[in-house]
Amino acid sequence: MVKGFTIPAESRDSRGKNAARRLRANGSVPAVVYGGQAGPAAVAVSPKELTKVLNSKTGHNTIFNLSITGQEDTPVMIVDWQYDPIKDTLLHADLKRIDLNVRISVKVPVVTQGDPKGVKLQGGIHEIVTREVEIECLPNDIPEQFTVNVSELMVGQSIRAGDIPMGGSIRLLSPPDAVVSHVVSLRAEETTTAETGGAAAPSAEPEVIKKGKKEEEGAAETSKSEAKKK
């Protein structure tokens, strides 16, 4: 989704871990911009501004303008990023130049709406199997999310990726038969589990008993033999 805001950046010539540490100490993070006709460019960007983008509703699908000092503003999106596992601060980001007239592939979240009848009337369980689908479209048509209504779902029924309405330039890339959400029977699952558990438990016991009997019989025969010898 295209947002009408701009994030400033500065070109950087320094490379390596030490240079990256100095950059972070000064309040910026290293980033690389690539894609399009221009070659890769190393830049320094504000981690706070990039974090705002990642934490927004559209997240990494957000397209914004990157303003590199001395260059024209370029539409970009965040395609990869790295966080510090302890401090949870942004360490690095990869930004891709976006041509607003060229189709791109992105993954979009899927959220459900409503309470399935199969849960309220039949005591089933509503499960969300797929939380995002992959699509291809023009940058201006990237949706914030897809919302599917699950109110009419009964036990045994499901909504698949191919059931999600898509308009404009959007084309589904995920398998159309991929289950997004379904309602399953709780009783059926409990019965299957009980039957499986009930059948598996006794199988080992007879073997132990038989083995024990053989060992006892063998010990008894040995004692009788020794007694005869004496």
Image (cartoon, rainbow, N blue to C red):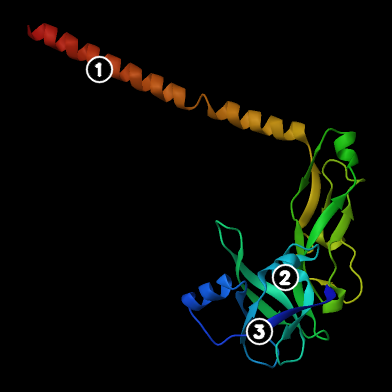
Q: Is residue 81 visible?
A: yes
- Using the image, determine if residue 132 lies above or below residue 219: below
Q: Earlier in the sequence, mark 3 or mark 2?
A: 3
The residue carrying mark 2 is: 49
Determine whether, in the image, residue 195 is placed left or right of residue 74: left
Label 1 – label 2 distance at C-alpha: 80 Å
The residue carrying mark 3 is: 10
Q: Earlier in the sequence, mark 1 or mark 2?
A: 2
Q: What is the x, y in percent for residue 177?
A: 78, 60
Q: Is residue 174 visible?
A: no
Q: How many marks?
A: 3
Q: Residues within 10 Å of mark 1 (few under 14, many from 20)?
A: few
| Three-letter code for the amino acid on which mark 2 is drawn | Glu
Determine whether, in the image, residue 198 is placed left or right of residue 140: left
- Using the image, determine if residue 219 lies above or below residue 190: above
Please tell me the numbered disc located at residue 46: none
Q: Earlier in the sequence, mark 3 or mark 1?
A: 3
The residue carrying mark 1 is: 218
| Three-letter code for the amino acid on which mark 1 is drawn | Gly
Q: 69 or 140: nearer the eye?
A: 69
- Using the image, determine if residue 118 lies above or below residue 55: above
Image quadrant where one finds the N terminus: bottom right
Q: Are marks 3 and 2 in contact (CB under 8 Å)?
A: no
Which numbered disc, 3 or 1, marks the residue closer to the eye?
3
